[in-house]
Image (spheres, grey):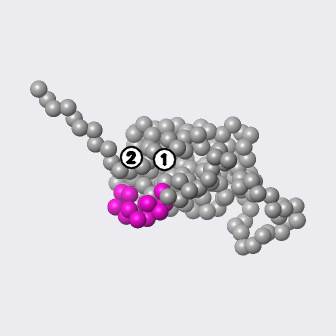
Amino acid sequence: MSRPQRLELRPLFLAGTVLALALAPACKKDGKESNDPELVDGADDGAQEGGEETGPEAPSYPEQDADPPELAQAFELFVMGKYEDAAAMARPLSESLLEDSQIRARGIASAIYAMSAAQDLAEHGHAPGELAVEQAGRLADPELTQFANMGLAAYHLGVQDYVKAEGLLASVVDTESPQQT
């Protein structure tokens, strides 16, 4: 009689799954929400009407395109533990979404790719994780920031840099998404 195989859960999978489930609604857009960086935070400081910037802010980007449906599919594959398939779907998206109106989608694709690729070898998640954080820095989109930090945290968990991973994951939890208001 053979012994039943023990299910081995890695810390990255647990952290990723918990955060993924918390953010799952973030991938679905109904088209009515705005991805405009100036409207996402809900604050209208009047800078748009006066044409003045309120400090050394990043340049303004066009309204973001709707998230491609492949992002939700790649994320679903990741949550299901099909990391190679998720990486294979997210990587081409990350590399092909280059327009200024696709910053959000590219960042989310890069984050999904980072989380998926880090499952195979942690170092594979570093570059896409950094790219996701870079894209998040360009927009004031809380969901993109959450995904980007999760992607980079996957790399740090994989290389056992738990202090940086904990800081990134704490910022994911602390970032208020529009759905929480």
- Residue situated furthest left in the rendering: 1
Q: Residues within 10 Å of mark 2 (few under 14, many from 20)?
A: some
Q: Secondary structure at mark 1?
A: helix
Q: Residues within 10 Å of mark 1 (few under 14, many from 20)?
A: some
Q: Secondary structure at mark 2?
A: helix
Q: Position of residue 171 (x, y in %)?
A: 53, 59
Q: Position of residue 162 (x, y in %)?
A: 38, 62
- Residue situated furthest right in the rendering: 50
Residue at screen point 11% across, 26% down:
1
Between the residue at mark 1 and the residue at mark 2, the CA separation in whole angstroms equals 10 Å
- 94 or 38: which is nearer to us? 38
* Residue 125 visible here: no
Label 2 sits on what residue type?
Phe
Q: Position of residue 4 (x, y in %)?
A: 20, 32
Magenta residue check for 162: yes
Query: Magenta region: which residues?
Result: 157-169
Residue at screen point 42% across, 37% down:
80
